[in-house]
Amino acid sequence: MPSPEPLSASLPLGDDWQALLASVARAKGWPASAKELAGPVAELSKVYNGLAPEGSSRGDRALAARLGFSFPRDVAKGACAVRELVSSGLLAAHGGSVSVLDIGAGMGAMSVGVAIALAKAGQRGSIDATWVDSDLEAMRAGEAVVRAASRIGGIELSLRGLSHRDAKEASGVFDLVIAGQVLSELDRAYGEAERADLHAEWLKTTLRERVSHSGALVVVEPALRDRTRHLHRVRERLMASEAVTLFAPCLHRAACPALATKGDWCHEDLPLDLPEWLVPLARAAGLRWEGLTFSYLVLRRDGATLRSVASNARGLVRVVSSALVSKGKREMLLCGETAEGPGRARPFVLDRERDNRGAWDSAVRGDLLSFDPPVGSGRLALDAVRTELVDDLSPRR
């Protein structure tokens, strides 16, 4: 088996993907250059951010923008949303097939992201994906991409696309069900609380009826404040059910601290930029290319959590902010098992402390840290606490 590579080694997508996506676009008569796509991508971004009505960006222009810009960006989100499942061995091909149900698949970026995550973990095998979406033309474009890619490392990706009206044909249970940016588009006419109730019930039903006992349901949403806070409210309702296990990103089932403060929200902001070949298009469309932002939930049925698979679960927390550097100290916002109980803590380390700084100084947003004893808010004396960056999620023996 090939040696595993860090997930970041696979992303951003290489130059070969630029040529592949451009060839699919040209075959469909769609624009493919940065100059041609700048306008459609900017229009699509306004719709995505709620700054323009959905009907203002449709047809071939919108499809070309999705293929040329949104697809490679969303592939990275799909790969990163399953990174901990793959690292822990809870999502694995190992020479066999992984069954995937991709709800609201669009062009299949989430499924391709899963394939990349498995391939970069050194796995070999196949993904048997079922895509469900109301946009048949988008799925056809995604199918063309998959045919052109053939294999992704050691992973072969086969698929069938179904209209949402034919979703019942996707019978049985799956190793992985993924819903990428689906909740954002559903039930917008409902009020905040009722909408969260509806989506929590839908996810519970999907987990119970569509996910195998050892499988997972992954929900990926934009990192926009309102949409992420909606996901927090859905999480809150899901945690009321003992039948739902929260695997990631959270390390506890307690109320989300972000919901306690109006305007606060918790999301991923990983140090992963767009591919260099996409930067000119992002610039031309007036969009950012630095970092990868999204919010997500990974749900299971079998009780497995990040705490249960981490090599060191003592005082386990996730870094949920960038480093907060001010005169004489370095702070970080952490969430997990703290000295005050499950929730957030905001410790700081003084610059004059020179020893045992390795894990503290190298940690970035999204990382897992272990503190023994658990850490609280306020000054952190590193010489009195064992601090470890937790990157070993391999199955315990």
Image: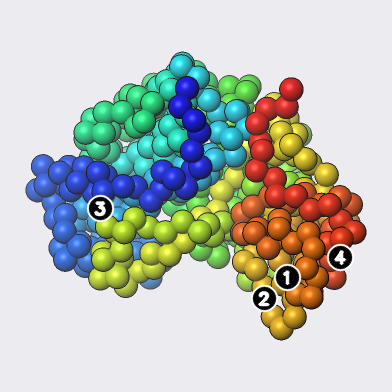
Q: Earlier in the sequence, mark 1 or mark 3?
A: 3
Distance (Cα) linking label 3 and label 4: 49 Å
Q: Can you tell which mark lies on residue 331?
A: 1
Distance (Cα) linking label 2 and label 3: 37 Å
Circle 4 residue: 381
Q: Position of residue 347 (x, y in %)?
A: 79, 67
Q: Residue at x 25, y 70 (%)?
A: 284
Q: Position of residue 195 (x, y in %)?
A: 57, 52
Task: Specify the amino acid type for callout 2.
Answer: Val
Task: Specify the amino acid type for callout 1.
Answer: Glu
Task: Specify the amino acid type for callout 3.
Answer: Gly
Q: Earlier in the sequence, mark 2 or mark 4?
A: 2
Say if mark 1 contacts mark 3, CB within 8 Å: no
Q: What secondary structure is found at the residue carrying circle 1?
A: strand
Circle 2 residue: 325
Q: What secondary structure is found at the residue carrying circle 3?
A: helix
Task: Specify the amino acid type for callout 4.
Answer: Ala
Please name whichever residue, 42 or 392, is drawn nearer the observer in this view of the structure. Answer: 392
Q: Position of residue 47 (x, y in %)?
A: 35, 63
- Residue 112 is at least partly visible in this image: yes
Q: Residue at x 40, y 22 (%)?
A: 126
Q: Can you tell which mark lies on residue 68?
A: 3
Q: Can you tell which mark lies on residue 112?
A: none
Say if mark 1 contacts mark 4, CB within 8 Å: no
Say if mark 1 contacts mark 2, CB within 8 Å: yes
Mark 3 or mark 4, whichever is nearer to me: 4
Picture colour scheme: rainbow
Q: Position of residue 212 (x, y in %)?
A: 58, 22
- Residue 28 is at least partly visible in this image: no
Q: Is residue 313 left or right of residue 49?
A: right
Q: What secondary structure is found at the residue carrying circle 4?
A: loop
